[in-house]
Amino acid sequence: MAAAVEEPETRQHSTVVTGLRNHRPASGESQDISHILANTFKDLYTQDIFGTDSLNDLIKKDSGWSSSHDKYVEELQQANSEYSRCIQEADMLESHIIHARNQAIAIESQAYKRINPGDVCDQEGIFTVKSAFSWCVDSDLLEMHNLISPRDYLPTQTPRVRPPPPVKLNPAKPTIAYAMHLSKEPQDDGYTLIPSPEETVLNYSDLSLTFESSLETPKRENTPSEKPNQSKPSPKWKPSAKEKAEVRDELKRLKDRHSFLRNPHFLPPNAQQGGMSLIQPSSRVVKRERGRKGMREQSSTDDPVQVFLANPSVVLFTDYSVGHVYETTLELKNLTSSSRHIRVNPPTTPYFSIGLGRFPGEGGVVAPGMSCKYTVQFAPDSLADYEDFILVESHVETLLVVPIAAKRPPPILTLPRILDCGYCLIGGVKFVEFLCRNIGLSAGTFCVIPKDQWPASNLRAVARKYFCEQPPFAISPSLFVLQPGEATVVEVVFFPITADKCCQVFTVVCDNCQVKDISIEGEGQMIALELVSVSGEKERLVIGEVHDLTAEHFVRFSSCNPHSVQHKKIIVRNNVHVELPFHWQIMKPNLHPLLPGETPLPSHIQFQLATDNAFNVSPLTGLLAPCQDQEFLFTFCPKELKDYHSVCHLVLRDVPQLPPQPCENSILQPVRTGSKVNDVIVMEIEVKGSTEPYQVLLDPYAVVIPGEIFICTTTQRPFKLWNHSKTFICFQWERLNSSSHIIEVEPSTGRIEQNECFDLDLIVTGGKPERVVTSLVCHIEHRHEPITLPVEVSFKGPTVTVGVPSVDFGLMKLGEQTQTSLLLTNTSQLEASWTIGGSQHDQQDAQMLVEPCRGVLPPLASCSVDVLFRPRFCQQFETELELEVENGTGCHLSVRADVQSPQVCLLNCELLLSELYVGVPAKAAVTLFNQTLLPAHFQWMAQLQGKQASLCSASFDPSSGSLGPNASVEVTVTFTSHTDLELTEMAALCEVQGMNSYLVLGISASNIKELSVTYSLPSVGSNPDDKSPSSILDFGGDVVCKRPVTKQLLMTNQTAIPAPFTIEPEYFSCHASKPNNQQEKRFAYVKKPLHSIQAKIMEEKAHEEFVSSLLAHGKGAAFFVLPNTGTLGPFETQTVEVTAYTDMWGEYRDNLICKVGDLETTLIQIQMTVTGCPLYFQITGPLPDDQNQGPIIQFGMHVSGGDTVSRSLRINNPTMYNIRMDWETYNIDQNDHQLVDVVVKCGHAFPIKDADGNEVLSGALRLSDGNVQTGRERIRTPGSDGTSSSLQSQTDTEEEEMSDGCDENEACFYPFPAKENLFSVHIRPHMGNLSDYPYCITPQQIVIPAKGSSTIHVSFTPLTLSGSACESRCVGLALGFMSLDSKTATCVLGKVERAQGLDLEPLRMDLLAAVNPAVLVVEMEKDDGVLQFHASTGDLQRALSERELIVQEFDITKSLHLKNPLETPLHFRLGTQPPFTVLRPQPRVRTSSSSNSPTGDSGSLVLQPQNNMQVKVAFHCSRGLLDHVDQADEDVPPGVTLIHDANGPRKLRFQQNLLIHYSNNSLQTVPLCAFLDLSALRLSTQSINFGFCYVGQMQTREINLHCYGAHTYWKSVIESDEEDLCVFSVTPDFGLLRSKEYVSSCRQCLQISFTPSKDREFRATVLIRSPLVKTPLTLQLQGTGSFDEAYSSN
């Protein structure tokens, strides 16, 4: 059995941990969760706001800074201290919780061991323990720091009371009865206090009087008998069902060994027989624990059996008071099955006592299930809590402990532990009230005393004062009583005397013997104000400016306008934690002048209030908040135009005086409530400001509304009001509100900011139509003079019109009435109130009625008005209707009506006729008037009446008719006199129906005349009495050939007698109809309408045919008279147009034959001179102007020395005469300054020549076949092709005889042909140099037949220019002199005479050509004139692999363009020399291969005019070009130059020319230049000496390989003995050196390694080879191997 019991104990350590099912708390280091917070909050947790170093630097105080900085540092130090304290408290809490958790686990482990000593597997959770964490942790500490404590989630637990130690029976100990009845020792009667050496400490003695501490629970120690509510542990291993069964059987066998029968009286209470419990089962007791799913089975023999049960289990007294005794009954029931003896021990304290027991039977034996009762008495001497117990002894070892407690619910006050009075000024008194409420369940009496006076022997002596004072604090009341729920005010007085923190501790004592300490804190402070900032621009005092003597600060306001407001924000900081009452005073400045360094005297400083009220401070009074900035608004509001100067004093009110320092022997004074306070000026701010007048402007300055506007209609006109003042302005416009009009401005009031404008509207509303000129007044606030806005406007009212201008009722009979309607229309947008009626209220208006007579018309509306007329008598009714419109425009309407009887009369009864002409009817008019409104019919008699009626005749038109009402008719009287005598006795009669008598018209005529005609020119007035022509009809001396000229002849009939007339020329007559008639006939055959252009062409053609018909007679001129016949009307001036048509030059004379009626024939002389040339070139056609100017023949641009170019020109002769032309060519030189030419001729200037140019005799012209042709035959037989034949022989001598029709008078008037002179001299402007080179005309003499044409050839031979000559322009002139070989064509005696040869202006033809040398324009990319190539020798290298290179030639191609700027094609060949080659050009036009190419080879090219071609030139780069680098100067071919650059690179320059060979053997060159970059290598050193090196160790040296110019590949080779070959190495040994962009050189770092293999000297040579550098670079290497460890690098 012992082995079985000890066996589980060996496994104790392994089963305790597994059975608890809780995590064992780790150490403090393993509880670090910073990594979780860092992962969750990122930088917000890991990044320090202030680092440790930064914080240490910030909290260091430096006395050199300002007081504000010191205060800031102090506050920062306090914050840092608070932060450190919080961190320490958090660390303390964490350590405490970890420690409590470890302690609870240890307790729980021990409890588990007790209930499961055998370490039995607890798979089903039978063995459970209660959690001990709530007893190990300090709940008050957790709640103090606002953490969750076990009280918040665990039910209320009964306080654990430790049982008293077991008491052994002592027979010598007096019993209770002995002590109460026989013993003489002082006994505890419950009333008398018996002193004892040890005082009982109450469990609830630390109960606080405050609310926070009233819920505190005392700490309790754990006992082994307690069973914590701990969750079941979970074992790490799970036994099988077989193992469980074996364990149960083993336990059963152990129990059966001790199961035997005993005497029930002597059995222990937990025995199964006899002494079994009455309330516990005999076998097993199944206990179900609340909140657990599992069941725990326990044997009845394991736990002690309870013998007696106390009722109540705890004797408790709750409501008691001092001086009273309280009793209660304690019942003890026997729970076993056997009778039991009992002994009760009394309580240990004198406050509790117990009486004799009352048993159910005799002998003090309690039967099973019965109970005995005891009386327990309680006699308190105070209201404190009491605790005690009663011990009940029986036959069992375990004693029954019955606790006794007297607990009165304590009063709980809401007074905090710390009473903070805040801050107070030194010398001041501050009263702070705290509300104190009793929230407990019982009343209490409380006393407040200083901490140093507790404990007090007599509280009454301490609490007899109302105030409990402990400087610098006092508290009242010091004694007060509070019932449950009552409250009182605790007043604390704080009166600091020093500027530091103060703290005093007071003790609050309750009548239930509870004591608590409260602390009162406060801080005394001194006044500290600071001006933080001033808004706006800070301005300082100007040197020499007057300022106040004592002002500390200065504020200047900018210049502003009167009554404007300026603000500046002043921020004053209160650096103390006390509210400071203040007020501001505006004072006059103290402006006493002081010398530098002088101190102002007190007499200079005076305090006088400012009276200008320009400066204000807001708020004026108030409180400065503790440690906050107070913002003050300084306002500057001037009233006048002047400068203002004041000083603002900040005055603190009720500032206490500093108290006197107390002496050591002074007696403590009571609380001071009457400390002396004064007002103190703590800050002076000097303020200045100036003013200037307002600046206001109107835009526009006046408002003029054009036109008229309707009344009752509101019209707006915008305008602007500008404020150029320093501040805003407030304006108010007056309103013009008269009885008729309203003129106002909207908005009428407003505010305009500085330098801004305000958009206003002028609102005009008219009341009546009139013109208004006024001004609106605008008042500017605080401006003395208002501004005015002139306004000018015109108003008009509604307009009503009538549809008819008048009303005419016409003819009416008496008794009849008539009616008409009038349409009234309102043409305006206004409502019109109208009234219509007569203008005069007389009898006439009574005959007329208007309905309706008044009304209102809406805008643009119409209405109808009826007018009724009722005549009362015969009359001519005339009146007016007046339409009146209220405030508008009406109109007047005339009304007419005729009511009369019929009556007709002649307005003129006698007709007088004067200036009559025989046989010519004369017309006159008479008027018949119907005097009535009735129609009348009249009839004139055909025969005249009188003695002379047979000598004349008369007719009337109309001869009869009807006259309308009151109408008149004009009758035309046509009178014809058949004699020139005066007629006086004649009359005409008119019959009128309805009249009894005829109307008689008397007729008389006088001054009768005969026919008379005069002739005149438009520019010369005519004389009626002179019937002969007044002047000659002269067409002028500059009539152009083929250009018609019209002159007018005026033929005037001086009488009223019409007469026929005829006019025709005497010699140059023509017979043709008008061209218009011919055109009309031609158009008559056209069915479709013609286009305008076609019609014009046909019209011109018809006109040409008309002119040809006029000149068909071959006289060279014709005068066309229009009109040539007709009738000259009475007093008519007939304009006769005489048009001269010509086709030949010459001087013409003729007469016009005029015949009018029976008058004699009149002759009018005509003369004109015709100039111009009738010939024209086919290419130009007829020229209306500049007929002597022929075409300009341009031969264009030609190459020097080219072939002759010829042009054929055709000349037409439209005249009827053969015209011979002699051509001369001239060269015009610009440097020729000759002005005139003098030409002297002998005989004919241009005689007739044969085909060879020889002069022939006059007489006949011989044709090429030998026949002789006369002049007339030459005219009749022109050439077959329209050209004349060549002149072969003499001219025709036949001449037509002159006409003999001229008499002697005519012969004297007309000139005769002049005789030919032997010599003739002509002076003319200089034409040029006569020459037939380079221009030539063939033939030089040619006859152009009449109505035919001839052809001439003009040729140009290009000049041959010298090699240096530039372009040459050839300007020439050809003159064609005209001659007539026929005498009849030259002169017609008295009619025409024509000049010829030099006397006649020749036909001119201009000749132009240019000769240029053969040169092409070369266009390249650059304009430097040289085609440049750039190549690098590095491009010759091609890398096939890392180690294999080849050299490959390449070409660089450049292109240029050749342009032919000439007007002729250029033939050329291209060529050059190596290393340049010309590639086959690609011309944009085809190359010429014609037979006329100057060079017959296939390489010749042709470039057409203004075309270009591209030529590609290649530069061939090969390795052979590098040979020129090392050649001597005399061996270098021409054009090759080696260029050395200053930076090191070298280049080869190749210069050649591109040769252009032209067909005229000229040569042109284009420079070619190519630059070839060369490569150059260089080593930074020529040799390397490694010195002594340890054998087998590698030594490395670095050198630089430099490359200049073109990039190149290189390769290194080491030359040495075979043994030394492996000693040296080069890294790298192959590479490419390429320069960067814009850098001419590059380098490669080479590492030379030396690894000696023996103890001797080694030598080698490194060769650096490049395919572009002929001479390799050499590097000498030297090194010595040694076994001496001194040279070892290790």
Image (cartoon, rainbow, N blue to C red):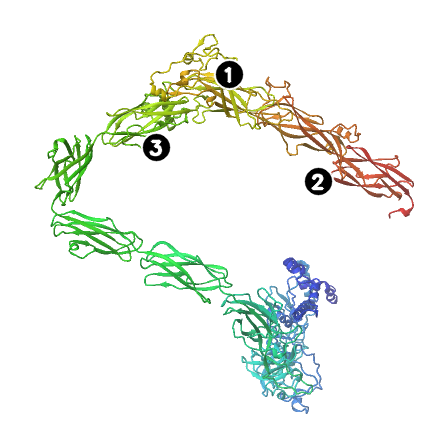
The reply to whether the C-beta atoms of the residues labelled 2 and 3 are less than 8 Å apart is: no
Which of labels 2 and 3 is toward the front? 3
- Quadrant where the N terminus is found in the figure: bottom right
Give coordinates of residue 402: x percent, y percent.
63, 79
User: Dot 3, how many residues are within 10 Å of its Cα: few (below 14), some (14-19), or many (20+)?
Assistant: few
Please state if 419 lies on the left or on the right of 1270 as rendered.
right
As shown in the figure, which amino acid type bears the numbered disc 2?
Glu
1273 is higher (above) or lower (below) than 1463: above
Say which of 1267 and 522 sits in front.
1267
User: What secondary structure is marked by label 3?
Assistant: loop
1049 is higher (above) or lower (below) than 1210: below
Q: CA distance from mark 3 to mark 1?
A: 50 Å
As shown in the figure, which amino acid type bears the numbered disc 1?
Pro
User: Dot 2, how many residues are within 10 Å of its Cα: few (below 14), some (14-19), or many (20+)?
Assistant: few
Find residue 1019 and name its label.
3
Residue annotated with mark 2: 1637
Residue 704 appears in view: yes
As shown in the figure, which amino acid type bears the numbered disc 3?
Ser
Residue 420 appears in view: no
